[in-house]
Amino acid sequence: MVNYPNGKKKAYTSNPTSAGGRGMVLEKDINVTNMFYLSIDKAVIHKKPTPVTIVKVDYPARSAAKITEAYFKLPSTTDYNGIYRGKYVDFEAKECASHTSFPLKSLHAHQVQQLQNVINHGAIAFLIVKWTVFNETYYVKA
């Protein structure tokens, strides 16, 4: 079937966006890659947990607990760390929706400092940046 123009404008529908799920596609890809590297004994790399303080928990059922209020304890350093060929590895993963550039404000000062600190001690440090609009992923040496 061919969609010939009928003179009517197509209704525009927008998809609401939020920062909540940003980075989840890249994170999933990296986690799958890290599991593969572990399975072939190439590297041991894990996602670092984000430190949080739990303030309030609801118990709707005896066996179920629901965290309803929590706060970040400290700024997290970087997203991933581990060992590759006997060297410590530390890296940050970022997704970018820009068509023109990577916003440096996406990298926080404490993350840059963490990468610099591990480099100073002989570690491997880098960024992985995924441009979602182009579906391209880049390795950026720190």
Image: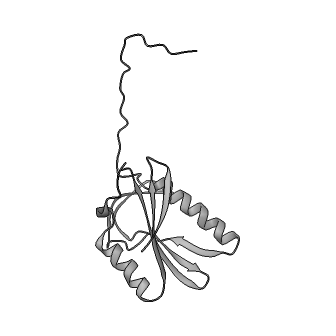
Number of numbered labels in the structure image: 0
Look at 42% across and 10% down and name the residue there. 6
Find residue 11 and report its horizontal and vertical position in percent. 36, 22
Specify whether 97 is left or right of 87: left
Q: Please, which residue is most extreme toward the top here?
A: 6
Q: Please, which residue is most extreme toward the right here?
A: 40
Give the answer, above or below, for where 39 lies relative to 122.
Answer: above
Find residue 50 and report its horizontal and vertical position in percent. 41, 68
Image quarter hosting the N terminus = top right
Give the answer, above or below, for where 135 lies relative to 80.
Answer: above
Image quarter hosting the C terminus = bottom left
Q: Please, which residue is most extreme toward the front here?
A: 100
Specify whether 26 is left or right of 32: left
Look at 46% across and 57% down and name the residue there. 130
Of the pair 65 and 95, the residue shown nearer to us: 95
Of the pair 35 and 109, the residue shown nearer to us: 109
Find residue 10 and report its horizontal and vertical position in percent. 38, 20
Look at 33% across and 66% down and name the residue there. 107
Find residue 133 and report its horizontal and vertical position in percent. 43, 46
Specify whether 136 is left or right of 17: right
Of the pair 98 and 93, the residue shown nearer to us: 98
Look at 35% across and 73% down and name the residue there. 111
Q: How is colour applied across the structure in the image?
A: one colour
Give the answer, above or below, for where 110 lies relative to 65.
Answer: below
